[in-house]
């Protein structure tokens, strides 16, 4: 049985000067090396939940256990910031947070803050750049002279350089073209295969279907589903109620099924799986 | 998402001051600030203070919220006052050390400066608390109209002003977003000496500037794409209407002014 990376118990959060609870009693456990997708409408509490997991907000009540640290309403600020040694957070449009004169300087910002030695930092920069697939020559360039896609990779490298065991990504592919999206997702998948726990907020159900081994659906500050993508997609009515869509492969499969083509699996997670299902059904017909 | 009350933010409640025409409010505020410089005695000071207190009472905005507005500036005021006390000369000397001395004139001057600061800030807070920023911009545009005669580009200045005001909340939201992101990268804002704290501003300010310039360029493109011509005659979506109560407010301001000069002359 895998160890749990994040344990959340009955978590409540209300933003200052508001009365409505942004999170109303959330409990969940994320295992090490999980690839968790968090889905839900805007304002459903996804961002609040991941901000709490990264110690950027302090819970109003409830408890979080992250990498051996316990966080609750009475935890001190410096204790909260210790979380950043274990959890990395790639924000939406992370390239908007670049600031340094050179790429290397920007990537080293996080490791510097963690108080690493100069040698360890240099190694971390090189490794992070390699991971995001950027040439080391870029190190001395200004991050503002790069292309949009490259800037995003530099920003992600800045988080990866801190070598987090848990990586949170908030819509990491927003605004990227198809190729850059696929490359980025492949990178995240590879990190996951190498042992990093991934928590990804997304609106793209195709990404959920293809990469996540677990999906958490949120609505109005509460978890309404915590299951596998396959399971979630087998209740299309429930998804519609949450204003979520099915990935194309599942939608086509269910459409075919409802119109007489009997498929064995009506929730194929990728187009390849769907194709296989159709082939299987056709072969059966021919027999 | 931060709903902190900042200096100069509008407080949406119902009051007679909220209903007044922004033009008369702006004129009254400017007139009041000018009057403050005519204060030359305790009695005149009290007179203006009473007038301001009535305005605060009429604004239906709690004293606490005014204090919230002044608080961030309070330290600056105190430092200025301290300098004034320690480094001005004249009159009886009570204490001195090197170039620093506490003198009678210094004390009086610092008291006047303290009074002016507090009253001016409070008076402008009354204006900004009771008037939405776009209305202040409209009022300013109206006040500047005569300057067109001497070829001042009033329309452009007004546009600049309203765009600047429009983006204040956007930029504040963005600041908190960037701060959050840099905190996620292990930055600790409450740590270290003043020098390191100033250094901590760099990772916040640079992205803020870069993004603002980008946004400005996008906005300019969008406006040009929709055919914006800076020299065209403009009409206004929000019309300013003058009511009887606005005239009465102007008369009240005159009473305050006349009262002040009467006190100056006769007492």
Image (cartoon, coloured by chain):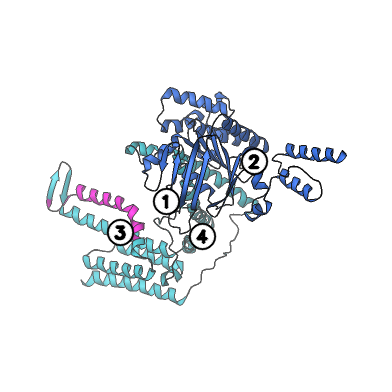
Chain colours: A blue, B cyan
Left or right, residue B64 beside residue B221: left
Tags 2 and 3 on a common chain: no
Residue B251, quarter of the rendered image: bottom left
Q: Secondary structure at mark 3?
A: helix
Q: Residue at x 54, y 58 (%)?
A: B155
Task: Using the image, determine if residue B35 lies above or below residue B82.
Answer: below
Q: Please report, as a chain letter, where disc 3 is located.
A: B
Judging by the rendered image, the residue that carries numbered circle 1 is A61
Q: Of discs 2 and 4, which sits in the foreground?
A: 2
Residue B172 position in % (x across, y down) = 46, 50
Q: CA distance from mark 2 to mark 1?
A: 33 Å
Q: Please report, as a chain letter, where disc 1 is located.
A: A
Tags 1 and 4 on a common chain: no
Q: Which residues are magenta?
A: B66-93
Judging by the rendered image, the residue that carries numbered circle 2 is A207
Judging by the rendered image, the residue that carries numbered circle 3 is B118
Q: CA distance from mark 2 to mark 4?
A: 58 Å
Q: Residues within 10 Å of mark 1 (few under 14, many from 20)?
A: some
Q: Residues within 10 Å of mark 3 (few under 14, many from 20)?
A: some
Labelled disc at residue A81: none
């Amino acid at each position: 049985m895998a160890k749990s990376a994040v344990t959340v118990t009955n978590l409540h959060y209300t933003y200052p000067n508001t009365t409505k609870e942004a999170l109303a009693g959330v409990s969940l456990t994320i295992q090490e090396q999980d690839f968790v997708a968090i889905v839900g409408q805007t304002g459903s509490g996804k961002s609040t939940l991941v901000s709490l997991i990264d110690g950027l907000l302090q819970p109003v009540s409830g408890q979080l256990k992250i990498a051996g640290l316990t966080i609750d309403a009475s935890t001190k600020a410096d204790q909260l910031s210790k979380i950043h040694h274990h959890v990395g957070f790639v924000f939406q449009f992370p390239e908007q947070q670049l600031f340094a004169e050179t790429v290397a300087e920007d990537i080293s910002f996080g490791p510097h803050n963690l108080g690493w030695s100069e040698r360890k930092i240099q190694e971390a920069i090189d490794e992070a750049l390699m991971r995001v697939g950027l040439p080391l020559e870029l190190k001395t360039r200004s991050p503002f002279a790069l292309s949009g896609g490259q800037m995003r990779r530099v920003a992600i490298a800045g988080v990866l350089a801190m070598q987090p065991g848990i990586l949170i990504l908030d819509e990491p592919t927003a605004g990227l073209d198809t190729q850059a999206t696929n490359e980025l997702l492949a990178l995240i998948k590879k990190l996951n295969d190498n042992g990093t726990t991934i928590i990804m907020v997304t609106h793209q159900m195709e990404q959920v279907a293809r990469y996540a081994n677990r999906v958490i659906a949120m609505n109005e500050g509460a978890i309404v589903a915590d299951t596998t993508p396959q399971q979630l997609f087998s209740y299309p009515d429930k998804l519609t109620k949450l204003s979520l869509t099915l990935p194309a492969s599942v939608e086509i499969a269910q459409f075919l099924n409802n119109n007489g083509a009997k498929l064995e699996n009506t929730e194929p997670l990728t187009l390849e799986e769907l194709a296989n299902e159709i082939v299987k059904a056709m072969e059966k017909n021919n027999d | 998402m931060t709903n902190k009350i900042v200096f100069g933010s509008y407080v949406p409640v119902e009051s007679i001051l909220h209903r007044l025409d922004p033009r008369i409010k702006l004129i009254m505020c400017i007139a009041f600030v000018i009057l403050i410089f005519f204060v030359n005695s305790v009695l005149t000071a009290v007179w203006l203070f009473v007038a301001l207190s009535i305005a605060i009472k009429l604004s239906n905005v709690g004293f606490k919220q005014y204090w919230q507005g002044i608080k961030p500036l309070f330290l600056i005021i105190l430092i200025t006052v301290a300098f004034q006390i320690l480094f001005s000369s004249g009159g009886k000397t009570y204490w001195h050390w090197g170039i620093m001395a506490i003198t009678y004139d210094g004390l009086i001057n610092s008291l006047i400066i303290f009074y002016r600061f507090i009253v001016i800030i409070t008076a402008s807070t009354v204006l900004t608390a009771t008037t939405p920023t776009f209305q202040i911009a409209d009022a300013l545009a109206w006040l500047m109209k005569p300057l067109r005669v001497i070829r001042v580009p009033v329309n452009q200045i007004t546009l600049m002003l309203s765009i600047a005001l429009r983006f204040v909340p956007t930029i504040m939201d963005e600041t908190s977003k960037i701060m959050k992101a840099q905190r996620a990268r292990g930055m600790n804002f409450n740590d270290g000496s003043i020098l390191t704290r100033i250094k901590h501003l760099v990772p916040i300010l640079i992205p803020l500037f870069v993004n603002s310039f980008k946004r400005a360029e996008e906005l300019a493109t969008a406006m040009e794409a929709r055919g914006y011509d800076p020299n065209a005659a403009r009409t206004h979506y929000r019309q300013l209407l003058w009511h009887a109560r606005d005239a009465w407010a102007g008369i009240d301001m005159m009473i305050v002014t006349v009262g002040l000069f009467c006190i100056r002359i006769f007492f």
